[in-house]
Image (cartoon, rainbow, N blue to C red):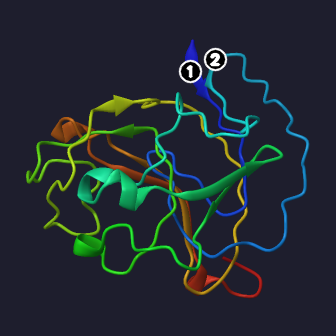
Amino acid sequence: MKNLIKILVILLLSLVICPLEIHSQKMNNSVKSIEIKPINMKDYKLVFNEDFSESELNTNNWLPYYLPQWSSREMSKPNYKIKDGQLSLQIVENQMPWCPEFNGEVKCSSVQTGVFAGKLASEIGQHKFFNPNCVVREEQKMEQKFVPQYGYFEMRAKFAATKSDVVALWMIGFEDSPDKSSELCVMEIKGWNIKKNKA
């Protein structure tokens, strides 16, 4: 039986699943509640479902950080709210850059489902896409909350469309070996590319 990986999420800004990243501003309007209709896929089995029904982030499913090995857990923790089954990741006015040494002034609010990194000062770690000179600045305990190899994924999201926003759902490799290195961009919207009738 195939695994069904179904992620049912209504987001105001963005969500990270290995990771889903956000660089955005606070959103003023709310997401209307939409009835979620189950998909009849008899050959699949539901193995992961997140509806954000609790008031706190479920840390059995999520790591509330963005690539913390290149910076620190403190610097890379997201600003977020969970309300009415919605995860709202936000960039707030006084938020500091998540990794100024390697990623400049970029601010990020993100959650992810796994982390792998080498020893302090090593070059080993997930997703060095933004700067090949990255070195580990904070050692991380290896965590695999949800790191599937195959599956069917589903997500609902909404974000504030300003020129500086980037909102995405990325699946990246766990990268504990070279053959597990990749990035699948399921959804990525760059605010500066949004036109009147298309994104």
| Quarter assignment of residue 96 | bottom left
Q: Amino acid at mark 2?
A: Lys
Label 2 secondary element: strand
Residue 10 is left or right of residue 193, and the answer is right
Badge 1: residue crowd in 10 Å (few <14, some 14–19, many ≥20): some
Task: Find residue 129 and report its image quarter.
Answer: bottom left
Q: Residue 46: image x %, image y %?
A: 65, 21
- The 10 Å Cα crowd at callout 2, few under 14, some 14 to 19, many 20 or more, is some
Direction from residue 149 to residue 84 in the image, left or right: right
- Picture coordinates of residue 116 (x, y %)? 26, 39
The quadrant of the rendering that contains the C terminus is: bottom right
148 and 116: which is toward the camera: 116
Left or right for 101, reference 22:
left
Query: Which residue does the image show at 37% across and 81% down from the upper left?
Result: 105
Q: Amino acid at mark 1?
A: Asn
Mark 1–mark 2 distance (CA, rounded to whole Å): 5 Å
**Element under label 1?**
strand
Q: Tell me which residue sits at (54%, 61%) in the image.
A: 168
Q: Which residue is mark 2?
A: 45
Q: Residue at x 55, y 84 (%)?
A: 164
- CB under 8 Å between discs 1 and 2: yes
Residue receiving disc 1: 3
Upstream in sequence: badge 1 or badge 2: 1
Q: Nearer the viewer, residue 194 or 122?
A: 122
Q: Residue 155 in the image: x percent, y percent?
A: 67, 46
Work out whether 93 lies above or below 184: below
